[in-house]
Image (cartoon, grey):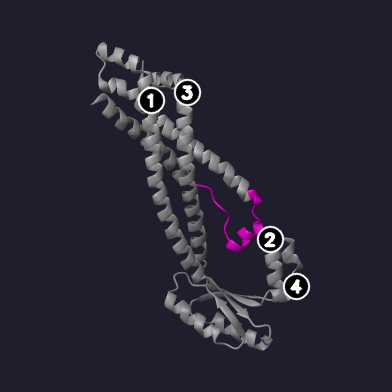
Amino acid sequence: MTPFDRAWRGAKSDFRLYALSVFSVAVAFVCLATAVLVVVNVHGVRERWADTGRASVFLKSTAEPEATDTLEQALRKTQGVLAVRRLSSEQARKELAGASSDPVFDALPADAFPASLELELEPGMTTIRLQKLKAQLASLPSVDSVQTYEAWSERLGALLTGGVTASLLLAAVVLAAVVSVVSSTIRLSLQRRRIEVEVLKLVGATDEYVRRPFVVEGAAQGGIGALLAVLLLGVLFLTVRSQIDPSLFTLLGVEPLFLPWLATGGLVALGALLGACSALFSLRRLLLV
């Protein structure tokens, strides 16, 4: 009989105990997977705003058309500016209203949206050059403000760093939880099957032979628990996403993403590895190998 057959037989005999263990592991991994999901989406938003390669020059409502024409022509000849697109207040309102299904945007007057010059910047423009261009534009009498989106990138970078730190701390908590749950389950299962183990030892079975099905059971508990956590998080993700106003995604410029396949597989593999190691550790002490 292979270790997998013996593990399957043992799991069926202790089904309730193993089901409780899998549930506990799943709860722990839901917390870790949620933190990883937040990090993935914050990273996506940060990459979107860090690599926009654009800037918005918002014009004052009192700006004369001649002054705006002169500014547009000057920007087209400015080094580092690849293209300039002029948006009137009405065009800005239509663009935002067309990208969103929220009727609130349709009800807003055109005056609520300032006219602007949208700049496409040269890739890799240095921060010094960008800040110099921003300062020069902001000093013009027809310009109300200039947005280069650097501040958003910096704030999102700080948030991303905090998210990674929180994920690492949660990973340590999950490690402790899985080791504790799986070790306890394996020890209880071993006590319930003590007679079977003693018989195997009497007929000459080695500790390694006795230990293998328990290690398989531990890996299965960790892997299945992590997989259930990912599936549960997927259901919650779809539910929450359907309740969020699409206009928020329009403003952010990105769609929310679920965990990539690599992260999903990594979580399941981590659960299986932790379960196997926990079982192996507890059995080494009990069998005195």
Which is more N-terminal, label 3 or label 2?
3
Name the disc covering residue 15, or none: 3
CB within 8 Å, label 3 to label 4: no
- Image height check: is 59 above or below 23? below
- Image height check: is 10 above or below 102? above
Which is more N-terminal, label 4 or label 3?
3
Q: Residues within 10 Å of mark 3 (few under 14, many from 20)?
A: few
Q: Mark 4, mark 1: which one is toward the viewer?
A: 1
Q: Is residue 104 left or right of residue 286?
A: right
Please state the horizontal and vertical placement of residue 87, each as a whole percent of the image.
Answer: 66, 75
Which is more N-terminal, label 3 or label 1?
3
Q: Amino acid at mark 2?
A: Ser
Q: Mark 1, mark 3: which one is toward the viewer?
A: 1
Q: Is residue 233 left or right of residue 4?
A: right
- The magenta-colored residue range is 242-260
Quadrant location of the N terminus?
top left
Q: Residues within 10 Å of mark 4 (few under 14, many from 20)?
A: few
SS at mark 2 in the image: loop
Q: Residue at x 71, y 68 (%)?
A: 94
Q: Amino acid at mark 3?
A: Phe
Q: Amino acid at mark 1?
A: Leu
